[in-house]
């Protein structure tokens, strides 16, 4: 096994084989290979930390540039849309008499919930997602800016997953208008995938002052103050920090400083 397929991808995508199919211009086969391990290729192809994962394990990177695995994965999804390959076209719904009448509730329609729903549906399980917003995608929609991940890509991804027969109950929030007791009575299993979109506290003096915001909440609720004429300090150097910095820049901040 090539290092990139052996340890580079947390999902164990068969990287050499799907790239081989792309090289042969067999895009349906490439999409089929990817769909064995992921239902988010158009998303992961754009936002995964490729340099640390698959591309970081690419042997071509030892002496030169690694293969652009993320770009190729994203391209496969684009070809699937262009050629109208659905998930139903490339995966097989596996018949299992022990599972065919089973029902599972998924609380939270973000990437974890969507992935769980798709793979459960693949085995013929009846799945219902309970989502607190009136849309699916979670962090993919309200946590990652449009300039990094197109909302159209998220919508197309969600559509393909729902086409597998997954049902959705929108505007349902755990602890408000649904509870685990209700779900436990109706379903054979419950998968909790609400996410943890809360900024980590640093425990430093002043972090509760007015004008100090958590990056995760700032992106999710899009409740930005007026940045005009103000100096903005972003504490941190990860993806959330970069997304906040670029979002603030795009909101026409006159001056923005990024302190790491």
Image (cartoon, rainbow, N blue to C red):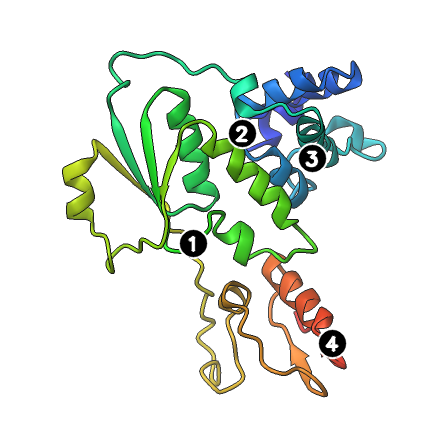
The residue labelled by disc 2 is: 38
Q: Which residue is mark 1?
A: 134
Look at the image and tell me in which quarter the C terminus lies: bottom right
Asked whether 155 or 142 is in front, the reply is 155
Tell me which corner region of the image, top left, top right, bottom left or bottom right, holds residue 153.
top right
Instruction: Mark yes or no: residue 48 visible.
Output: no
Q: Position of residue 58 (x, y in %)?
A: 72, 29
Q: Residue at horizontal 72%, vertical 21%?
A: 19
3D distance between C-alphas at marks 2 and 3: 12 Å
Q: Nearer the viewer, residue 60 or 145?
A: 145
**Mark 3 vs mark 4: which is more N-terminal?**
3
- Which class describes the residues within 10 Å of circle 4: few (<14), some (14-19), or many (20+)? few
Q: CA distance from mark 3 to mark 1?
A: 27 Å
Query: Sequence order check: which comes first, mark 4 or mark 2?
Result: 2
229 up-or-down from 139: above or below: below
Reading the image, the residue beneath label 3 is 74
The residue under label 4 is 252
Q: Position of residue 33 (x, y in %)?
A: 60, 18
Q: Secondary structure at mark 3?
A: helix
């Amino acid at each position: 096994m090539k290092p990139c397929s052996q340890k580079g991808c947390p999902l164990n995508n068969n990287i050499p084989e799907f790239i081989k199919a792309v090289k042969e211009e067999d895009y349906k086969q490439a999409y089929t290979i990817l769909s064995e391990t992921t239902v988010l290729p158009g998303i992961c192809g754009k936002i995964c930390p490729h340099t640390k994962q698959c591309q970081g394990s690419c042997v071509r990177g030892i002496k030169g540039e690694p293969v652009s695995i993320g770009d190729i994965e994203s391209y496969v999804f684009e070809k699937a849309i262009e050629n109208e390959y659905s998930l139903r076209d490339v995966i097989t719904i596996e018949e299992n008499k022990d599972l065919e009448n089973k029902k599972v509730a998924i609380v939270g329609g973000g990437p974890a919930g969507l992935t769980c729903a798709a793979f459960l549906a693949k085995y013929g399980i009846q799945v219902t997602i309970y989502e607190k917003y009136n849309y699916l995608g979670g962090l993919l929609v309200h946590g990652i800016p449009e300039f990094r991940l197109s909302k159209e890509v998220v919508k197309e991804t969600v559509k393909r997953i729902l086409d597998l027969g997954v049902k959705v109950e929108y505007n349902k929030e755990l602890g408000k208008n649904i509870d685990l007791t209700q779900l436990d009575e109706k379903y054979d299993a419950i998968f909790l995938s609400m996410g943890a979109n809360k900024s980590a506290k640093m425990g430093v003096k002043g972090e509760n002052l007015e004008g100090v915001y958590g990056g995760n909440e700032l992106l999710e609720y899009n409740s930005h103050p007026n940045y005009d004429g103000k100096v903005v300090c972003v504490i941190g150097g990860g993806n959330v920090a970069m997304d906040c910095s670029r979002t603030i820049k795009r909101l026409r901040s006159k001056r923005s400083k990024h302190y790491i």
